[in-house]
Amino acid sequence: MPTELEVTESYFSRQKTVCTQQLSAAEHLASQIFTPHHLRFSRRGQRLNARLVAARIGAVTVGYLRYGADVELVNSTALDDYHINVPLTSHAESWCGAATAQATPTQAAVFLPGRPAGIEWAADCAQLCVKFSRADLELELEGLLGRPAVRPLNITHSMNLTAESSRTWLALLSLLYREFSRPQSIVQHPMTGRHFEHLLMHGFLLAQPHYQAMALDAEQQAAPPPKVVRTALDLIEEHPEWSWTTTDLAREVGIGVRALQEGFKRHVGLPPLTYLREVRLNRAHAELAASSAGDVTVAHIAMKWGFGHLGRFGTAYRRKFGVTPQHTLRAT
């Protein structure tokens, strides 16, 4: 169950940019951020010109990486997590266990935990590299399904980036990467960042073929009984200030994410997080109406009830109540 929101530096790793011409430095830094590996030149007479830009949000690490030389990466141990490499230019030859894949701008390479892996990385190849924590991605699938999943996930080793679902996921990945460079972006706030984290993992599980993809499609058609939806509503009403996600709610009531969404659609008429926002707005309105302007601020009440962006809170508040939060507070 989620706890009350705590802003902790450990949830985020701020974007870091490193440029180096030293092979050992590039190996050390990339090993720290992604996975331990050995790095060597594929041919003699080359000079490294590496650039690494990376950041982390919860269970997801996203980075841009190029070496400027033909290099080979070989993992020193079996992988611990799930990795996806998306070339922006040129190509890379990848292998994971017995499977091989050529990564290009139209086909990403997928690496699975528990297996050795390696990459032949072309000098002119730049890639967006994604790492999903193994435990968290597998929990996300179980949340979507509403039941335990076989681990590790048997995911296809290449991802077709021309498919509509994959293109949507890639657009989300690109947006997240760009927003990491903006210190004031809402992605940098744990309350919204957590949703981006889940969305990127959900999107990957829905876009990429794996052995339980059909079960996810079937889950979309299922709708829970009203009492299960009522339990989810009670959880929201009891603690609307908590940083709920749809996955959290589904896990708490013991069903899949899509089943919960369908249940809310049928029995409530609103998606779970839209209902959550309405409850939060009502609580904020009630507290503003009962408070004195000298004792409390709009920002304090907005944050208390789970609104991380004051401007968006003000817009939603005025749309619902016809006045600004400041007007309600001054009126008392």
Image (cartoon, rainbow, N blue to C red):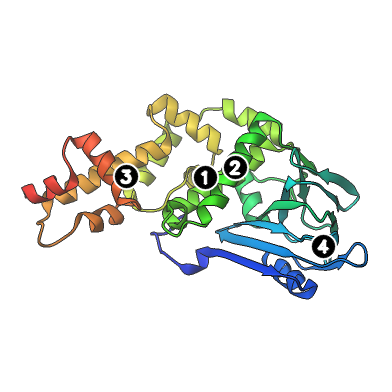
Is the Cβ of the residue at disc 3 closer than 8 Å to that at disc 1? no
Marks 4 and 3, the one that precedes in the sequence: 4
Number of marks:
4
Contact between labelled residues 2 and 3, with CB atoms less than 8 Å apart: no
Q: Earlier in the sequence, mark 3 or mark 2?
A: 2
Cα separation, mark 3 vs mark 1, equals 23 Å
Front: mark 1 or 4: 4
- Check disc 4 and report its element: helix, strand or loop: loop
Q: What amino acid type is highlighted by mark number 1?
A: Thr
Label 1 – label 4 distance at C-alpha: 29 Å
Query: If you read the primary sequence from the N terminus, does the residue marked by circle 2 or circle 4 appear first?
Result: 4
Disc 1 element: helix
Residue on which disc 4 sits: 78
Give whichever of discs 2 and 1 has the lower sequence position. 2
Horizontal relation, residue 200 to residue 302: left or right? right
The residue pinned by badge 3 equals 312
The residue singled out by tag 2 in the image is 202
- Picture coordinates of residue 22 (x, y %)? 77, 73
Q: Separation of disc 4 and disc 3 at Cα?
A: 45 Å
Amino acid type of the residue that numbered disc 4 sits on in the rendered structure? Ala
Image location of residue 250, percent across then percent down: 50, 42
Name the residue beneath numbered marker 1: 247
Say if 178 sits above or below 225 in the image. Answer: below
